Amino acid sequence: MTQNSGDASVNGGIDVEFDSGIYLGTWVASVASGSEVDYYGGYAGSMGDIGYDIGYVKFDYPATAGGGADFEELYLRY
């Protein structure tokens, strides 16, 4: 899926994770409507041979009036 009609995008992010399994981060990209800013955090670990990751991510489009394009998700991976 493209948000720039196939044009190039400048993007970058920063993440931090802790030995406890908690992680936090943000990611920013230029898109046709201005910018996309993602915020996320979660907890990853394992139980025996099964790994898991539970977290939250918010997709924010600051230039969009009223936040109509913003959305958020909870996720669980194993």
Image: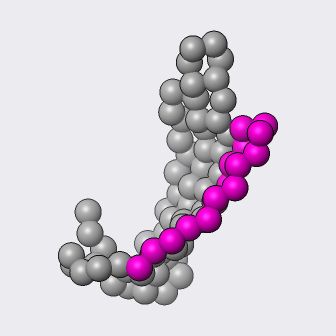
Image quadrant where residue 16 sits:
bottom right
User: Main SS type for the magenta part?
Assistant: strand
Residue in front for this viewpoint, 15 or 34:
15
Left or right, 29 with respect to 25, comes to left
Image quadrant where residue 49 sits:
top right
Q: Residue furthest top?
A: 48
- Identified at 53% across, 41% down, the residue is 75
- Identified at 52% across, 51% down, the residue is 73
Question: Is 24 one of the magenta-colored residues?
Answer: yes
Tally of numbered discs:
0
- Identified at 61% across, 37% down, the residue is 54
Left or right, 69 with respect to 38, comes to left
Question: Is 17 one of the magenta-colored residues?
Answer: yes
The location of residue 56, given as percent across then percent down, is: 60, 50
Q: Which residue lies furthest to the left in this view?
A: 6
Q: Is residue 34 visible?
A: yes
The location of residue 40, given as percent across then percent down, is: 61, 56
Q: Is residue 68 visible?
A: no
Left or right, 66 with respect to 41, comes to left
Image quadrant where residue 25 sits:
bottom right
Q: In this view, does 37 lie above or below 66?
A: above
Residue in front for this viewpoint, 53 or 63:
53
Tell me where the magenta segment starts and ends, as one range.
10-25
Q: Is residue 25 above or below residue 33?
A: above
The location of residue 46, given as percent across then percent down, is: 64, 23
Color encoding of the figure: one colour
